[in-house]
Image (tube, grey):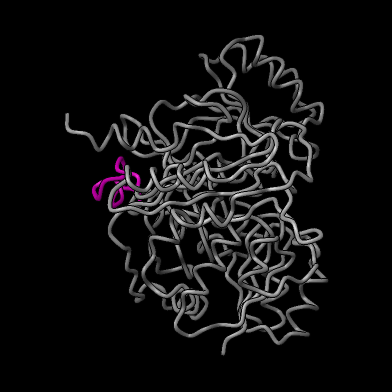
Amino acid sequence: MPRVLVVGGGGREHALLHAFARSPRNPELLCAPGNAGTAALAENIPVAADDIDGLLRLAEDRAVDMVVVGPEVSLVEGLADRLDELGIAVVGPSAAAARLEGSKAFAKAFMERHGVPTAASRTFGLDEVKEAHAYVAEQPLPVVLKADGLAAGKGVIIAETREAAVEGLMSLFDGAFGKAGARVVVEEFMRGEEASVFVLTDGRGCALLAPAQDHKRIGEGDTGPNTGGMGAYAPAPLVTPEVMTEVEERIIQPVLKGMAEEGHPYRGILYVGLMITAEGPKVVEFNCRFGDPETQVVLPLLESDLLDLFEALVEGRIGEADVRIRDGAAACVVLASAGYPGSYEKGKEIAGLEAAADRATVFHAGTKREDGRILTNGGRVLGVTGLGADLQEALDNAYAGADAISFHGKTLRRDIGQKGLVWLSPA
C-alpha cells in the first residue's frame, strides 16, 4: 500500500486527498498540517507547510513513498530539491524551476527570452522608485502593478486612475506585501477573459487537465480587491479544443523546452494562468502548483487514478499516461470570513456541513476542530463543489450546498460561473 504525504492545510490539499481516496489502490494518506476536513481522509500531522526540515524528518520517519506539495512557499524554498536528495519521490518542481511563480520578474524575462506571449512589462527595484513612477505616468490606463515575490495571490493592483497607480506603487515599495514588493513589475492591461490550464509534466512530456476559470475579486461582477479565489468552474467553455492546442504549442511546449535548456527542467504541476485576448491566449502568470479553488473543480472531473498519474510523472512517463476526464461540469463556491481579504475574525462555529453534503462536496480550507465543533480558522473557510451533467446543474448543486451551511459573517459571491453560462448559451 503506497504511503502518500500531502503538504498543506487548505482546500486544495483536501481536494487532492479526496482524489487520492478514490484510488482503487487504497493509498495510506498523511497530511501536514491539514485541517478539520482532511482529518476525515488522512492522518493530520502538525508540521507546518513551510517547516522544510520538519517535513523532511516526517517523510523519512514515516517511510513515505511520495510527497505531493500543495503550497508554493515550500517549493520556492527548496522542499522538492531536499526530498530528491533523500531519494523520496516528490510531485513539485525544484526551487530553480519554481521561480516561474516565486519571481514574476524572472517569469517575465524568461517568457521574453523564449517568445512566450504575455503582456508587455518592465521591472523596477527599490533603487528605481522615481523611474517606476515616471514609467507608470506614461502608460495607458488601466495599468497593472505586481509584487515580484509571493503574496498569497493578492500582490496585484489594477490601477484605473493615475492616483491609484501612484498609491499602488507607493504601497508596494513601502512594504504592503513585505519583501515580495522589493521589486515591482509594471504590466500593460490585457483585455479578454481569464482561464486556467493545469499541466502535469515530467520536464519533457505532459498531460493536460480540464481547463477552469477562477473568480479572483471579492465582489460580484468582478469588483473589489483580489483574493486567493472566490470560486471556480470547469471545464471553461472559452478554452475550446482549438485554444487548448494553441496554448500547448505556443506556451506550454516553449516553457518546458526553455526551462530544460536553461538547466532547470520543470517537473511537477504547472499552472498556466491565461488571458484569452483578441490576439490569442497570453500568459497572465504561472504557478508552480495546483490552484485554489480550481483544484476543487478540476480533480472531481478526473476519472483517471491520480496516484497512477503522479507515479507516471515522477517516473518520467507522463506523456504516455491515460488522462480521462468525465463528462459534465463542476462548480465551486467559496465561503469566506467577513472582512476577507482584509482582517477577519476566527473561531466562528460552522453548522450545516452534513446537510450540504446531500448536494455537494465540501472542501475545508480554513477550519479547525475544537471541543467537537468545527470552527472557522482562515479567510477562505470552505469550498463547496457541485457536479452536474452541465454547468447549470453543477452551479445549482454548489449553491444548494453553500446555502445549507451557516457561520457568523459568511461571505460568498452569487455570480460564480455566470460567464460560462453566457458562453454556453446559443447566440
Q: Is residue 418 left or right of residue 32?
A: left
Q: Residue at x 81, y 31 (%)?
A: 175
Q: Residue at x 56, y 82 (%)?
A: 27
Where is residue 283 drawn, in percent x and y?
Answer: 46, 41
Where is residue 304 drawn, in percent x and y?
Answer: 38, 72
| Depth check, front residue: 406 or 336 | 406
| 402, above or below 357, in the image | above
Most extreme residue toward the left is 427
| Depth check, front residue: 305 or 161 | 305
Q: What is the span of residues highlighted in magenta in the rendered image? A: 236-247
Q: Is residue 372 left or right of residue 257?
A: right
| Depth check, front residue: 274 or 417 | 417
Q: Residue at x 64, y 49 (%)?
A: 351
Instruction: Tell me if residue 241 is in the magenta stretch.
Output: yes
The answer to which image quadrant residue 217 occupies is top right
The answer to which image quadrant residue 172 occupies is top right
